[in-house]
Image (tube, rainbow, N blue to C red):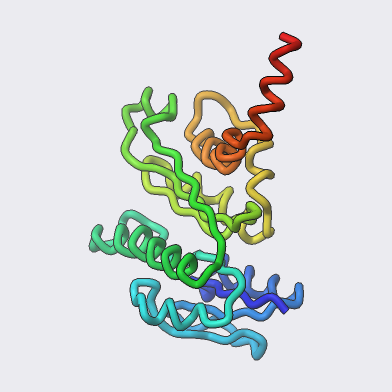
Amino acid sequence: MTRILVTGGSGFIGKHLASALIARGRQVRVLDLQPPPRALPQIEHVRGSVLDRDLVDRAMDDVDEVYHLAGLPGMWVPRKADFHAVNFGGTEIVIETARKRGIKIRILRWPYHDNDRAQTERETQGHIKVVTTAKGKILGASIVGSQAGELITTWTLAIAQGLNIRALTSIVVPYPTLSELGKRAAIDYFTPSLTSPWVRRIIAWLRLFG
């Protein structure tokens, strides 16, 4: 049986994700500062922060997959440093620990300064970061920048539905909009494959036909 850790599993999205994973026959462990709103006997709860490196390491004992949802949702928190510490520092701790334990993940990034709408509105500070399994299953996402609260909705839905990153590459978004940030990050997942010898041979072959 697949064993899964859900960080932030007591939150609005996390509790639904945990329930959906249980329904699919997964073993679920939740790491969260808050207790679950409704305790389920099938879910193991570990109380604590993703900033606690040792606790994160222990929470990943015998885990096959990690869904990272823990974070501070608004940039209006009283202490701005907390927003960065939890959403970026916490994410790095989870990622580093998962890699150390052999849980294969990919990190996809795309900066605001490469987006035409962001350039037009002079809002080029920030980026999107997406975490997936080696096979492309979306595990987590964070966005810092203009309209981050609106843009993250797509990713919370994708995580809750267990979507593969490929689904985000096929959506059609208006141009120019900040929504392109997510699609470009998703496309970035496939960039390494373009450098493989097999792909280069196919491209060379196609070039023979103009």
Q: Relative to 175, does residue 57 appear above or below in the rendering?
A: below
State the residue at coordinates (45%, 69%): 100
Task: Specify the farthest residue to the top.
Answer: 210
Of residues 77 and 30, the one drawn nearer to the viewer in this rendering: 30
Quadrant of res 77? bottom left
Q: Relative to 141, does residue 183 appear above or below in the rendering?
A: above
Q: In the rendered view of the protein, which quadrant contains the C terminus?
A: top right
Horizontal and vertical percent position of residue 43: 62, 84
State the residue at coordinates (42%, 59%): 73
Total numbered labels: 0
Q: Relative to 78, does residue 11 appear above or below in the rendering?
A: below
Q: In the rendered view of the protein, which quadrant contains the N terminus?
A: bottom right
State the residue at coordinates (33%, 54%): 75
Of residues 43 and 153, the one drawn nearer to the viewer in this rendering: 43
Horizontal and vertical percent position of residue 167: 68, 44
Horizontal and vertical percent position of residue 91: 41, 62
State the residue at coordinates (56%, 51%): 155
Horizontal and vertical percent position of residue 164: 67, 51
Quadrant of res 5? bottom right
Task: Specify the farthest residue to the bottom.
Answer: 41
In the image, 120: left or right of 12? left
Q: Relative to 4, does residue 88 appear above or below in the rendering?
A: above
